[in-house]
Image (cartoon, rainbow, N blue to C red):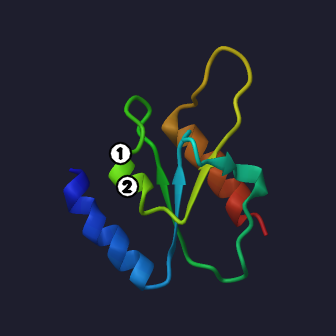
Amino acid sequence: TVEKIIPTIKNLKKQGYRIIILEQASNSVDYKKVSLSKNEKIVLLPGNEVDGVPKKILDLADTVIEIPMHGIKESLNVSVATGIALYRLLDK
């Protein structure tokens, strides 16, 4: 549940992790425009394919990223989207 993961996310932030959420949201940015500093510690939380990420979790994010989609379909399989984002974020 949402309430169970919030303390974990807050703890990770205290440990210096950057919380990046992969989700289509009003404040999301193109994943290709996000850069990481050398040795930056991150946590990538992908959104649920149907329900997305709850607002309480989105509010804890340091960065919300999305993979721009063109055409009728507006989402990718969560495992495919995660792979694309990780490849781009960690390809340094």
Contact flag, marks 2 and 1 (Cβ < 8 Å):
yes
Residue placed under numbered mark 2 in the picture: 57
Q: Secondary structure at mark 2?
A: helix
In-image side of 50 versus 27 (left or right): left
The amino acid on which the numbered mark 1 sits, given as a three-letter code, is Pro
Mark 2 packing: few (<14 Cα in 10 Å), some, or many (20+)?
some
In-image side of 74 versus 11 (left or right): right
Q: Residue 70, image x and y in percent? A: 74, 24
Q: Residue 44, image x and y in percent? A: 51, 59
Residue at screen point 43% across, 53% down: 58
Give the quadrant of residue 8: bottom left
Q: Secondary structure at mark 1?
A: loop
Residue placed under numbered mark 1 in the picture: 54
In-image side of 12 versus 6 (left or right): right
Q: Decide: is 51 above or below 32.
A: above
Q: CA distance from mark 2 to mark 1?
A: 5 Å
In the foreground, 31 or 82 = 31
What is the count of numbered marks?
2
In-image side of 36 versus 46 (left or right): right
The amino acid on which the numbered mark 2 sits, given as a three-letter code, is Ile
Residue at screen point 72% across, 78% down: 37
Q: Decide: is 26 above or below 74.
A: below
